């Protein structure tokens, strides 16, 4: 899976998508420090222990660099930035029953907008799994010769 590059200065608005999710009772917001144990467990239990570790890093930052999708006071998805390296987007995950309804795209857009407001011109999606999703959602482009990427020497 290649890394992908997103020019943040070309992002479009999220208001229409956010309104659609709000009608479904889904909110998107940054995580709060006291939620660290909940979100770390959510990522580890539903996705991977490695992602749980990256989420934990995000909750050690100010501001917290993990954005949450919430329905009925329960986490249904998350997206991180600046977890493995500065300027990187990810990891991100949405529970299977909420995929395809705009939650993942909203998490992506809000997270990238946050990076933009922090002064980043570009974001790197490390080891992008669904390449076509990122191309369509934010015009991300694959970074040449980026495989195996930053995760290549990770302990397992």
Image: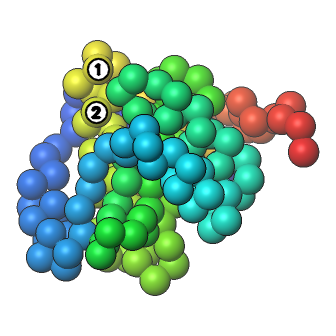
Give how far across and how far down residue 21 sits, in percent: 20, 70
Q: How many marks?
A: 2
Residue in front for this viewpoint, 138 or 31: 31
- Quarter assignment of residue 70: bottom left
Cβ atoms under marks 2 and 1 closer than 8 Å: yes
Residue in front for this viewpoint, 112 or 62: 62
Quarter of the image where the C terminus is located: top right
Q: For mark 2, does the 10 Å Cα neighbourhood hold few (<14), some (14 to 19), or many (20 or more) residues?
A: some
Q: Which residue is mark 2?
A: 114
Tell me: residue 92, above or below residue 18.
Answer: above
Residue in front for this viewpoint, 55 or 32: 32
Tell me: residue 13, above or below residue 43.
Answer: above
- Quarter assignment of residue 126: top right
Q: For mark 1, does the 10 Å Cα neighbourhood hold few (<14), some (14 to 19), or many (20 or more) residues?
A: few
Q: Please indicate whether residue 136 sits to the left or right of residue 110 in the image.
A: right
Q: Please indicate whether residue 82 sits to the left or right of residue 32 in the image.
A: right
**Point 75% across, 36% down: residue:** 151
Secondary structure at badge 1 equals: loop
Q: Which residue is mark 1?
A: 118
Q: Please indicate whether residue 13 sits to the left or right of residue 76 in the image.
A: left
Secondary structure at badge 2 equals: helix
Give how far across and how far down residue 138 sits, in percent: 33, 47
**Point 59% across, 39% down: residue:** 56
């Amino acid at each position: 899976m290649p890394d992908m590059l997103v020019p943040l200065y070309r992002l479009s608005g999220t208001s229409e998508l956010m309104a659609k999710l709000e009608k479904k009772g889904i909110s998107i917001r940054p995580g709060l420090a006291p939620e660290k144990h909940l979100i770390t467990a959510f990522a580890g239990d539903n996705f991977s222990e490695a992602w749980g570790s990256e989420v934990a890093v995000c909750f050690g930052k100010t501001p917290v660099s993990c954005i949450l999708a919430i329905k009925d006071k329960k986490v249904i998805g998350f997206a991180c930035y600046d977890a493995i390296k500065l300027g990187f987007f990810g990891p991100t995950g949405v529970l299977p029953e909420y995929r395809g309804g705009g939650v993942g795209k909203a998490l992506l857009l809000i997270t990238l907008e946050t990076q933009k407001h922090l002064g980043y011109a570009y974001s790197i999606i490390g080891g992008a799994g669904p390449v076509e999703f990122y191309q369509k959602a934010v015009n991300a482009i694959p970074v040449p010769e980026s495989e195996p990427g930053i995760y290549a020497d990770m302990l397992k």
